[in-house]
Image: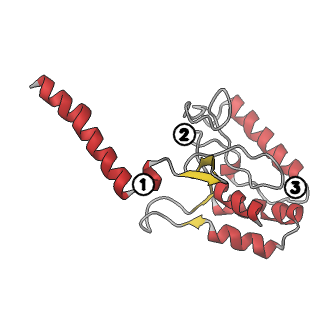
Amino acid sequence: MLLAMTVLTGVVYPLAITGLARLFFHWQADGSRLEDNGRVTGSAWIGQQFDNPRDFWPRLSATSPFPYNATSSSGSNYGPLNASRRKAMEARQAALRSADPGNRSPVPIDLLTASGSGLDPHISPEAAAYQAPRIARLRGLPLAEVRRLIARHTEPRQFGVLGEPVVNVLLLNRELDRR
């Protein structure tokens, strides 16, 4: 019985589920890979580091030894009163203020904190809107056009009730680069 269950649950079932996923959800089962000229440049579900002021910036990544390390998914595990967390948030706020000195709006919290996985490709629409004037100015685009791009890349709540609306930073930056 042990051998039969091992083969059934350890080999047959995973192969069947993988086959069905590849058949019905090929793009997702293949890693949601994004390609440019036949070269894989990322995944729609794994965040990437952007620190050029002309790009939208994602949430901080807590992975090590480098940001957005997909083999090392983890949060920072810092509590709300942790001095290291406060220092990281202050440094991030200083970087955002330095990139856009004229923007005196409050910085949305998701631009100051890391996600639970350290790999989140999304920011809130408010975080994207906060960055929009900087992007428009540095890319020479009308602010209204940047806001339209944000709206087009804003994903609604799942099933209309789960989670919050989000903006995929990588997809938004790719579209900006194509313009």
* Mark toward the start of the polypeptide (2 vs 3): 3
Quadrant in the rendering for residue 117? top right
- Mark 1, other Cα within 10 Å: few <14 / some 14–19 / many ≥20: some
Left or right: residue 54 compared with residue 57: right
Within 10 Å of disc 2 (Cα), the crowding (few <14, some 14-19, many 20+) is some
Q: Is residue 144 left or right of residue 66?
A: right
- Tell me the distance, in whole angstroms, between the alpha carbons under discs 1 and 3: 41 Å
For label 2, the residue is 117
Q: Quarter of the image for the N terminus: give it.
A: top left
Q: Any mark on residue 100, and which?
A: 3
Q: Which mark is residue 26?
A: 1
The one of 82 and 51 positioned closer to us in this rendering: 51
Residue at point 75% right, 54% down? 107
Residue mark closest to the camera, 1 vs 2: 1
Query: How busy is the neighbourhood of tag 3: few (under 14 within 10 Å), some, or many (20 plus)?
Result: some
The mark lying in front, picked from 1 and 3, is 1
Q: Quadrant of residue 149?
A: bottom right
Judge from the rendering whether residue 140 lies leftward or rightward of residue 122; answer left or right: right
The residue nearer to you, when weighing 113 against 5, is 5
Q: CA distance from mark 1 to mark 2?
A: 24 Å
Q: Is residue 28 above or below residue 1?
A: below
Q: Secondary structure at mark 1?
A: helix
Q: CA distance from mark 2 to mark 3?
A: 28 Å
